[in-house]
Amino acid sequence: MIPSPPYEAKTIAELDAQTATLLDVFQTYGAERVEPAIVTPADAFLDRMGEELRRRTYVFTAPDGGELCLRPDLTIPTCQVYLARVPAADRAMKLSYAGPVFRHNPKTPDRPGQSLQAGIENINAANTAAADAEALIVTDNALARAGLKNADVTLGDLGVFASLLEALGLSPQWAERLRRHVWRPAQMNELLKRLTGEAAEGSAFLSHVGTLPPGEARAVLRDALALGGIKHVGTRSIEEITERFLEQAADASSARMPRTVADLISSLLAVKVPATQAVETLRKLARTASVSLDAAIGGLERRFALLERHGFPLARATFAARFGRNMEYYTGFVFEFHASSVEPPLAGGGRYDNLLTALGAKRPAPAVGLAIYAERLLAARRAEAEAP
Amino acid sequence: MSALVFAVPSKGRLQDQVLAFLSDAGLRLEQLRERDYIAKFAGVDGLVSLLSAGEIADELHNGRVHLGITGEDLLHERAAFAHERVLTIERLGFGRADVVVAVPRSWIDVNTMADLDDVATAFHLRHHRRLRVATKYVNLTRGFFARHGIADYRIVESFGATEGAPAAGTAEAIVDITSTGATLAANDLKVVPDGTILESQAVLSASLHAAWDDGARSAARALLERIGARAQAKASQIVRVRMDQGVEAALPALETRFGAKVLTRAALGEAGILVPDANLSAAIDLLRATGAQGALSVRKADYVFTLDNPLFTRLKERLK
């Protein structure tokens, strides 16, 4: 059983002690403790999250009419603390936090949607591979110091898939489409059918417009709208519509990708192997398909080497190419820790290189974070203690 | 013992249709007092509560009414997190309207939900905010967009005149109810072809969380038997024929293949067989083929009460 509020006295004491241990470990890695506000303006927050997380966020109205929410996550508020302190976003900083987050769970609507999290956000570290490896090492050490004996680790790297898309020379709109549906097998299959021309794509008109020079194509389109007597409403401009229509037209008139390309994408996404075999498996796949993924695979290999050097035996981990933690903001290396006794992950983290710019940073500020879910960790420790 | 509460819409076209449907089944509404929102059916136990269509959906979920007739769109919208609370007893075939995703007609680049997905992502990148979808169907919209893998959007709750939101600049797209599409067209919007979320109609539903004591159950049985008996009568014909070996031979196939029901039979007398309208001529052909000798008479009944009333059976099985 994962404890939830109101906690019994014993649970309170255990959670307090556990949090103190986690923060202590974070401190040894040079993280500075921050305390973001629990109640936060909803707007900036809601605009950065997908609708799926938003449906689980408690949003309410302030007495003065403003829209507020209970923080559903601590990564965004911690990044906001960083930006308040370093408006130019030009300094490396490691911030740690511990406190409650609030998420409604539609499956258990009668239980409070409140839980405790502790974690680190490591922003602008110079050596990204080292920062990624460290995030996992810190998590592993913190769980062990808290008293957990066994955990399985799943690793992924969204950068590998991104570099495959690049190596295949897909149009930007196709690369973007495939990238954002990497965790949705059903959508991915549909997209691959369209990509190879097995599913219908566009009309004859669309294909024709796609073969015209851009200036002429725009004129044809203007005439089509005028002929149809179509009045334009809304905030999406005619230029945007035309631009995307021309992209579609270019897609419709360009050659379909051969089935072998779709198969390569599918087989890469299907890779799920012991982490010790991941690099070799990916290399073999790339070699067979004659695509170069050297940079991405090399990056993964460096992270793995760093993990081993810092005492994390790779044999404990599984690598899954599709694994992306189902959060839109992750862009690279990702990981999760699981215990057999507790279904949801005990901890997780990963690289998110675009979030800070989305939150207003004027320059790129790559970052990597980790979060430990306190009640789940306690439940897993108790299960280990009770096991014969 | 608590009285059965049956909720019907308190206003509008849906109320007219519901009252016509009920009175066709012999259930005539008696207002207890002028301008009162509580009434009863003449000659039946229990109370009738007149509520707005949305309130009926809420009260079915809360268990404050036992039975009710309202739009499926509202029930599904309220039911997003609680499918096990309300049982649909019967879809009634009137009050039809679709809940659809609509975008400006000038979006000639959008003809599928997959297109809308692309546009949502491009819009976010370009405008540094998410594409807004105005709707009062927050839960239906979220579920549908999630099934299509669309995440890059934001819902703006709208309570009325949703179709004006794109022109007013408060949203880029909408999810709304439409029956003819005329209102959408008048606002220069079009339905995304694979963007129909729900084909809604009026439904007779039961709350599984209401206080179903013996009194409420027997009142529900009486009501549902009337409604069911009328529905059964309207959808079928009664074939009467003198019993003989030919008729006997046809009966198993009539029941299994044509959904017929033997209402009466006497060894040397007449048989009455209830046959669904659609299968009537096939059933008569079969009777002749197996050698039924007597004259066949066919007529419509006003009500057909049978012990296995399907409406009440559906409710009883879920209340166990």
Image (tube, rainbow, N blue to C red):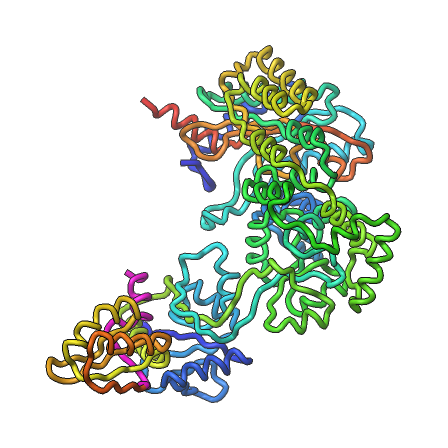
Which residue is at the far left?
B268
Q: Measured along the vertical axis of the image, is residue B228 above or below residue A147?
A: below
Q: Residue at x 57, y 42 (%)?
A: A189
Q: Residue at x 38, y 78 (%)?
A: B47
Q: Is residue B316 magenta?
A: yes
Evaluate whether residue B188 shows in this view: yes
Relative to B242, A245 lies left or right:
right
Q: Residue at x 26, y 87 (%)?
A: B297
Nearer to me, B247 or A134: B247
Q: Is residue B78 magenta?
A: no
Find residue B172 and report its horizontal and vertical position in percent.
72, 58
Q: Measured along the vertical axis of the image, is residue A25 above or below residue B40?
A: above
Q: Which residues are magenta?
A: B300-320
Quadrant of the frame with the C terminus of chain A: top left
Q: Residue at x 37, y 65 (%)?
A: B210
Find residue B42 and report its horizontal and vertical position in percent.
35, 87
Find residue A357 and report its horizontal and vertical position in percent.
76, 36
Nearer to me, A234 or B83: A234
Find residue A102 and report its horizontal and vertical position in percent.
56, 43
Which residue is at the far bottom?
B34
